[in-house]
Every structure is written in C-alpha cells, then in structure tokens.
Image: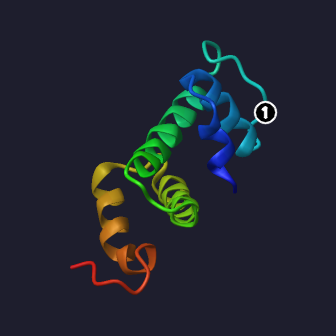
Amino acid sequence: KDFRVVFRNSIIEERKRELAKVLQFPEFNEEDDLRTATLIDVYYEMLSYLVNHGFPWREVASFFEMFQCLLNETQGKRYKATDRFIHRDKARLCGDQDVS
C-alpha cells in the first residue's frame, strides 16, 4: 500500500479520508459508524508516528501490515490472551530480530 498520498494533505481529516481510500474502506459516516472511524483513527495515529519519526516508506508499509495482523489476531480477545499471543508470536511478528 502506498501511504505517501495520505500525508500529502496538511488537514488531518482529509488525511484520514485518504487513508480510508488507500485501505479500500467503503464510504462511511464517522458519527454513524464509530467502529470504522475508530479503526481509521488508530491506523492514522500509528502511521503518523512512523512518518513523523522518519521511518522510510517501505518500513512504514511493512510495519502497517504487521500492525494490521496483530489487530486482526487479537480482536475480541481479553488482555491475557492478547498478551500470550504477542509473546508467543513476537519472533514471527518481528522477523528474525532478537526480541527478548
């Protein structure tokens, strides 16, 4: 996914609309669909952090995929189950890096 288009606009709400397009979310009303709006907010904040800290675009895209996988795997699970998942799969999530 090419997230560069998201950050070409200086208005945050426009950026979030662009992000929804990049992620191929159907059009939604933020007030009527709080789940989608919150998910876009979470994705946007994560991407903004990476971009604002100077990560290369390729790494931004890679981290996004990992983050999306993590959210999908832990959705609806309790904290302890999520924590076990992260610790069990942290090597897979972080590649071959030392994650001790």
Q: Nearer the viewer, residue 47 or 73?
A: 47
Secondary structure state at the residue bearing disc 1:
loop
Regarding residue 10, the answer to whether it shows in the image is yes
* Residue bearing the label numbered 1: 26
Q: Nearer the viewer, residue 83 or 67?
A: 67
Q: At 75% from the left edge and 38% from the top edge, which residue is drawn?
A: 21
| Quarter of the image with the C terminus in it | bottom left
| Residue 56 as seen in the image, left or right of residue 8 | left
Q: Nearer the viewer, residue 78 or 50?
A: 50
| Quarter of the image with the N terminus in it | bottom right
| Residue 86 as seen in the image, left or right of residue 10 | left
Regarding residue 34, the answer to whether it shows in the image is no
Residue that protrudes farthest toward the left in the picture: 100
Compared to residue 69, the image places residue 25 above or below, namely: above
* Residue 82, picture quadrant: bottom left
Percent across and percent down for residue 31 are 60, 12
Compared to residue 21, the image places residue 63 above or below, namely: below
Q: At 44% from the left edge and 73% from the top edge, which residue is drawn?
A: 93
User: What sort of colour scheme is used for the picture?
Assistant: rainbow
Residue that protrudes farthest toward the top in the picture: 31
Residue that protrudes farthest toward the bottom in the picture: 96
As shown in the figure, which amino acid type bears the numbered disc 1? Pro
Q: At 58% from the left edge and 66% from the top edge, which residue is drawn?
A: 58
Percent across and percent down for residue 81 are 34, 59
- Dot 1, crowdedness within 10 Å: few (<14), some or many (≥20)? few
Q: At 58% from the left edge and 60% from the top edge, which residue is drawn?
A: 61
* Residue 19, picture quadrant: top right
Compared to residue 8, the image places residue 27 above or below, namely: above
Percent across and percent down for residue 33 are 63, 21
